[in-house]
Each structure stands twice: as C-alpha cells, then as structure tokens.
Amino acid sequence: MALTLTEKAAKHIQKSINTRGKGVGLRLGIRTSGCSGVAYVLEFADEINADDQIFESQGIKILVDPKSLVYIDGTELDYVREGLNEGFKFNNPNIKDQCGCGESFNV
C-alpha cells in the first residue's frame, strides 16, 4: 500500500503549510458525492488521529483514514497547471469510471 506525491505537489503542499504556520501534513480521503459515487477530500492535518494510516512522500506526511484507503491506495498526487487553471491531479489506478466533470469516481 502506498500513496505518493510528485515533486511539484510536495513543493506546493510544503509552501502552503509554511504559509499557514502549522500542520503535520496533508489529509487525503474520500466522501460520498457526485454522480459516480465518491470524491476526493484534501485538507491540511494539524494532528495525527489514532487510526490514520501514515505515508511519507517527498518529505510530506500523507494521512489517510482506513475506509478511504481502499479507494485511493496506489494514488499519485500531482500539482499541474493547464492554461490559466492549476490544481491537484489524482492519478488513481483503482478508478473504474468517473463523472464527466471529473469530480467523482467509483472503483
């Protein structure tokens, strides 16, 4: 089991944590949403929960709850700029189908 960050994603996350002035890493999870089933949830983590699975990539801790891990195991998180838009891109090998707008997916 593993979650990884590209160098660009790690730099963006570290810069954001530094700007916030606190945080132990990034919490990555899923929630029920959209027409395909589930969507990603990203937030800064200020503490580690007892049941968190902890992965480290590019010097950043990624915290995941056990229920979400089933959906996102093996995912690589990238930070991309496409034209005027920029944001995180999830390279998830478990996706079987996703919504046309790209917000939700199922495995």
Image (cartoon, helix red, strand yellow):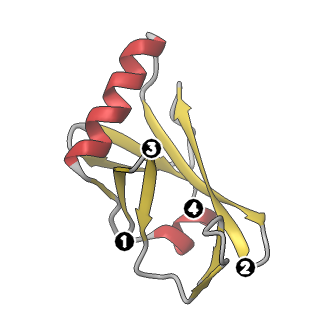
- For marks 3 and 4, the one nearer the N-term is 4
The N terminus: image quadrant: bottom left
- For marks 1 and 4, the one nearer the N-term is 4
Query: Callout 2, which amino acid?
Result: Ser
**Location of residue 11 by image quarter:** top left
Q: Which mark is on residue 84? A: 3
**Location of residue 106 by image quarter:** bottom right
Can you name the residue that lies furthest to the front here?
83
Query: Callout 3, which amino acid?
Result: Leu
Mark 1 is surrounded, within 10 Å at the Cα level, by few (under 14), some (14 to 19) or many (20 or more) other residues, namely some
Q: Which mark is on residue 74? A: 1
- For marks 3 and 2, the one nearer the N-term is 2
The C terminus: image quadrant: bottom right
Give the residue at mark 2. Answer: 36
In the rendered structure, are the residues bearing label 3 and label 4 in contact, judged by CB atoms less than 8 Å apart?
no
Instruction: Indicate left or right for 84 with 51 as reference.
Output: left
Query: Callout 4, which amino acid?
Result: Pro
Q: Nearer the viewer, mark 3 or mark 4?
A: 3
Q: Residue at x 57, y 61 (%)?
A: 66
Q: Is residue 102 above or below residue 55?
A: below
Q: Nearer the viewer, mark 1 or mark 4?
A: 1
- Where is residue 36? Give x, y as percent: 73, 79
Instruction: Indicate left or right for 84 with 31 as reference.
Output: left
Mark 2 is surrounded, within 10 Å at the Cα level, by few (under 14), some (14 to 19) or many (20 or more) other residues, namely some
Q: Is residue 36 above or below residue 79?
A: below
Give the residue at mark 4. Answer: 66
- Where is residue 3? Give x, y as percent: 35, 60
Instruction: Report the Cα–Cα distance between label 1 and label 3.
Output: 29 Å
Mark 4 is surrounded, within 10 Å at the Cα level, by few (under 14), some (14 to 19) or many (20 or more) other residues, namely few
Instruction: Report the Cα–Cα distance between label 3 and label 2.
Output: 27 Å
Instruction: Report the Cα–Cα distance between label 1 and label 2.
Output: 20 Å
